[in-house]
Image: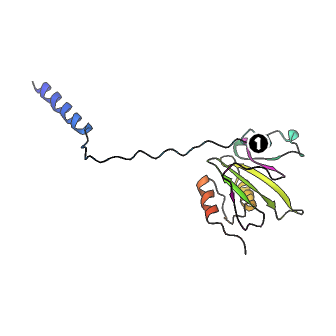
């Protein structure tokens, strides 16, 4: 009898703990997940995130691929302006006519190399997981961001862009 009573009390307590009071309010739907879909990479940037090429396979006339962390290409730079994905931001007033597009794992930066001997147009894409600190600082300079430390994630990039001010 005690076992039956104990089992009944256990089940009753369990049932009550699962029930919730309905206060009649309408509960909002949870927010939709933000898309983690990445823009398709043009063929020039196909090496990004791939294993680093052997040094004897480097094409000096083609895109410049920088070997990053874990033996993967962390940054690819092409010596010209290219179409950026829809939604790229223009940093109005930038010296190098900078445009930036931030994704969940990659950042696209386009601008003019103002410290090069000749003004050179360039488009770079950096893979945040594989880029070294030096590669991130390089692309931050191209984007004319004054942050003194590497921007390691998309939120840090977005915050830096939001705080960006043209040089006077």
Magenta part of the protein: which range? 71-96
The picture places residue 100, in percent across and down from the top left corner, at 70, 56
Q: Give the camera-side residue of 147 and 161.
A: 161
The picture places residue 27, in percent across and down from the top left corner, at 35, 46
Q: In the rendered image of this protein, does residue 76 appear above or below residue 142?
A: above
Which quarter of the picture shows residue 160?
bottom right
Q: Is residue 120 left or right of residue 5?
A: right
Q: In the rendered image of this protein, does residue 15 appear above or below residue 126?
A: above
Please report the residue visible at 67 percent of the width from the left and 43 percent of the height from the top: 39
Q: Is residue 147 left or right of residue 44?
A: left
Q: Is residue 86 in the magenta section?
A: yes
Q: Give the camera-side residue of 98 and 50.
A: 98
Q: Quadrant of the N terminus?
A: top left
Identify the main secondary structure in magenta.
loop
Please report the residue visible at 70 percent of the width from the left and 41 percent of the height from the top: 40
* Residue reaching furthest to the bottom: 168
Which quarter of the picture shows residue 43?
top right
Q: Quadrant of the C terminus?
A: bottom right
Q: Give the camera-side residue of 120 and 83.
A: 83
Q: Is residue 78 in the magenta section?
A: yes
Q: Which residue is mark 1?
A: 42
At numbered mark 1, what does the secondary structure look like: helix, strand or loop?
A: loop
The picture places residue 152, in percent across and down from the top left corner, at 63, 54
């Amino acid at each position: 009898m005690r076992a039956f009573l104990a089992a009944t009390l256990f089940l009753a307590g369990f049932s009550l703990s699962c029930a919730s009071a309905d206060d009649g309010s309408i509960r909002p739907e949870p927010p939709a997940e933000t898309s983690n879909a990445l823009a398709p990479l043009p063929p020039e940037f196909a090496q990004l995130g791939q294993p680093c090429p052997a040094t004897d396979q480097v094409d000096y006339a083609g895109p410049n691929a920088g070997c990053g962390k874990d033996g993967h290409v962390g940054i690819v730079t092409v010596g010209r302006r290219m179409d950026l994905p829809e939604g790229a931001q223009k940093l109005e007033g930038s010296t190098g006519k900078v445009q930036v597009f931030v994704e969940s794992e990659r950042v696209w930066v386009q601008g003019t190399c103002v410290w090069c001997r000749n003004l050179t147009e360039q488009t770079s894409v950096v893979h945040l997981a594989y880029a070294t600190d030096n590669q991130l600082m390089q692309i931050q300079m191209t984007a004319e961001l004054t942050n003194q430390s590497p921007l390691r994630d998309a939120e840090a990039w977005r915050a830096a862009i939001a705080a960006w001010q043209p040089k006077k």
